[in-house]
Structures are given as structure tokens and as C-alpha cells.
Amino acid sequence: MNTGDTTSSIVVDTSGSFFATVSLGGIFDTLPAVVVTVYPNPMANIAIIEGDTAICQGDTTVLEANYNAAFTYQWLLNGNPIAGATGQTLSVLSGGDYAVKITNATNCFKISDTTTIAILPPPNTQIYVLGSTVFCQGDSVVFSVNATSGNLYQWFLNGNVIAGANQPDLVAKVAGTYTVQ
């Protein structure tokens, strides 16, 4: 293959048969051809097949790399290999930057773009008591949690759902153990 280069060395990045013609004092000599084979790198892509990029503590996101039976996989967290994470899918429980290194049958590899998983902090569920928890029949006490836009609330009495009790405040009129989710 004639590249048109006139230097003593070249860098090639495509397959082909390369030769050089050398001239010394007007005498030309063609050196034997060198066959170069350049194997392609595999594609390396990540898809989220379950969950999201922002999850609550204890939840899971499942990442999946593109599949080929001839590929081997190594998942990375913040650029470092995750021990034992060599399958096509990865269940993610912690935050960080995830990528996958895919190696094909010719030992060429590609590292995917990163997918960042964030762990959302749990909401503040401290219950504030507005009044006394000891009161006479017919009276009540108010329980309250910090109201945050976007949060959903469910109050429980003795571990059972209180129907319709889905606001940050609850007026309690009966004895028992109150909790909120």
C-alpha cells in the first residue's frame, strides 16, 4: 500500500500490506511487504434495565452492557475494577461512576462511557410532638414531621395503616404507637 510518506517510519492504523522503497545514491530498492492486521475494538455501551440513575438507599439499579457471546466483561467503579463483576449485567447498590470494559475475541477492548449512580439521602422522618402524649378522652395530640415538597407520607397506628393519614401532620385522638413512613 502506498501511503505517500517519505519518512523513515510511519504509523499505520488500518489493515493492509505495506512496503517501502529506499533510494541511496540513485539506486532504488523495494523492501519486502509487511502485512498489518488491525482488529476492530468492540462497541461498549451501558443501558439501565431496572431502576434509575438516582436511587434510595437499599434500592438497586441494574446496568447491562451490549451482548456478544465472544465478549468478556469487567465492570469498573470510579475507574477501578469491581472484584467478581464480570457478567453482562451489574446490580448497583452504591453510588459512583460505573463503566464496563469489554474485550473481544481478538483481545481488543473498549471502555464504555460512565453512568453515574447517585444515592439519595433518606427523608428526615423525625416525629415532633406538639402537646402532651398524655391527655383526657376527647382531647388530642398533634404529631408532625418536616414537610418537604415532593415527599409522600403515610401514618401508622400500632403498625397498621391509618386510612387517609397521608399529610405531614396527624391529630391523634386514641392511645397507641404512632409511626410515619
Image: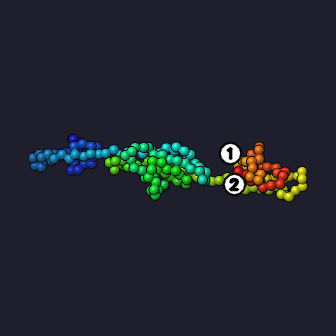
State left or right for residue 136 relative to residue 105. Answer: right
Q: Nearer the viewer, residue 148 or 178?
A: 178
Q: Is residue 80 above or below residue 150?
A: below
State the mark number for residue 114.
none
State the mark number for residue 150.
1
Element marked by disc 1: loop
Residue 157 position, x and y percent, is: 77, 51
State left or right for residue 68 relative to residue 135. Answer: left
Q: Nearer the viewer, residue 140 or 70?
A: 70
Q: CA distance from mark 2 to mark 1?
A: 13 Å
Q: Nearer the viewer, residue 6 or 46?
A: 46
* Residue under the image location 45 percent in, 56 percent down: 84
Q: Looking at the picture, which amino acid does disc 2 mark? A: Asn
Binning the other alpha carbons within 10 Å of mark 2 as few (below 14), some (14 to 19) or many (20 upward) gives few
Q: Nearer the viewer, residue 80 or 70?
A: 70
Q: Looking at the picture, which amino acid does disc 1 mark? A: Gly
* Residue under the image location 28 percent in, 43 percent down: 14
Element marked by disc 2: loop
* Residue named by callout 2: 124
Which scheme is used to colour this image of the protein?
rainbow
Binning the other alpha carbons within 10 Å of mark 1 as few (below 14), some (14 to 19) or many (20 upward) gives few
